[in-house]
Image: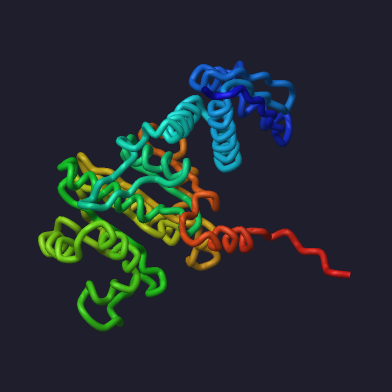
Amino acid sequence: MSSEATLTLTLDNRDEAVLLFGNRDQNLRLIRDALEVRLIARGNTIQVEGADYRVAEADRVFQQLRQMLRQQGKITPEDVRTVLEVVHQGSDDLGQKPLTFVEGSRHVRPRTDGQARYVRAMRDSDLTLCIGPGGTGKTYLGVAMAVSLLRQGQVKRIVLVRPAVEAGERLGFLPGDLVAKVNPYLRPLFDALNDMMEPDQVKRYMDNDIIEIVPLAYMRGRTLNQAVIILDEGQNTTIAQMKMFLTRMGTGSKIIVTGDITQVDLPKQTRSGLTDAVQRLRDIDRIAIIYLDESDIVRHPLVQQVVRAYEDERPRKKKE
């Protein structure tokens, strides 16, 4: 039997509490009913009472929602339902079936709540924008979703796209054919594919155009039906390039855009197409915008600390 527990959460201020609680405390009621806990809200504090494992779930739900509120400036009842489902499934181990990819003998599944929200968004939405630092699984999980949908017969092809910013998208001066020219820029996509499929199978799919890996400059004028189209390093597109890419979507297709808006390699005066798209598309149905942060990094544990160190811009006091 589980024991009873009590948790008190202190929010930053009253404004955060108002946005978090929702209109007439709608968000709190959703959390209370889903997790079967007692919630007592006073000012900018929330007291959670109930079974210890339910209180732990509520803590994770509130932390996820506070993160979303900081990133998006608002949360909706649908955001609350999504986070509840992800956290509740993860704790009860019911999320394995809907959140697991089985690729041959390999299993690829989300390892954080943020990654689970990302997977759910890709599954439920036609267009998913995922923003986060390196190591959070943006590209890897996107490719895993594409391979899974391909093997289930839900799509007929995968198109992986990356802007070759370092070459200015002018690839003619590089030696070799197209594949050889763009290989350095598309290597992370090859790595993800080869981790999920045998290299011979990847080669066969590429030879038959079932899997296509192309630089962004070669996407103009195309319409792609029944495909998963992934744009990696989306922060390095211009607004015009992002518009061009997003309008390649044909019938039965999904688009996934990943990027890290803190790592833009465009000229200083050029606005990132990914940053612009997040603002333009945030209120459109069937478009999901997912934010990951250092808590979702699943590389070597030191990577979290490195990311945090570079993001900490507060001036350090000089030692006396």
Instruction: Give the residue drawn at x 31%, y 38%.
Output: 123
Would you place residue 170 above or below residue 128 in this image? Answer: below
Instruction: Give the residue drawn at x 48%, y 66%.
Output: 266
Question: Which colour scheme appears in the figure?
Answer: rainbow
Image position, residue 290 (x, y; %): 45, 43
Total number of numbered discs in the rendering? 0
Image position, residue 92 (x, y; %): 42, 31
Task: In the displayed orientation, state which residue is furthest to the front.
Answer: 1
Q: Is residue 216 visible?
A: no
Would you place residue 179 above or below residue 88 in this image? Answer: below
Image position, residue 268 (x, y; %): 55, 66
Residue 315 position by quadrant: bottom right
Horizontal side of residue 209 vs 78, given as left or right: left
Instruction: Give the residue drawn at x 48%, y 57%.
Output: 260
Horizontal side of residue 317 vs 289, given as left or right: right
* Closer-to-camera residue (63/286): 63
The C terminus, quarter of image? bottom right
Task: In the displayed orientation, state which residue is furthest to the right.
Answer: 320
Image position, residue 104 (x, y; %): 20, 52
Would you place residue 17 above or below residue 213 in this image? Answer: above
Q: Is residue 300 visible?
A: yes
* Closer-to-camera residue (271/207): 207
Instruction: Give the residue drawn at x 17%, y 47%.
Output: 151
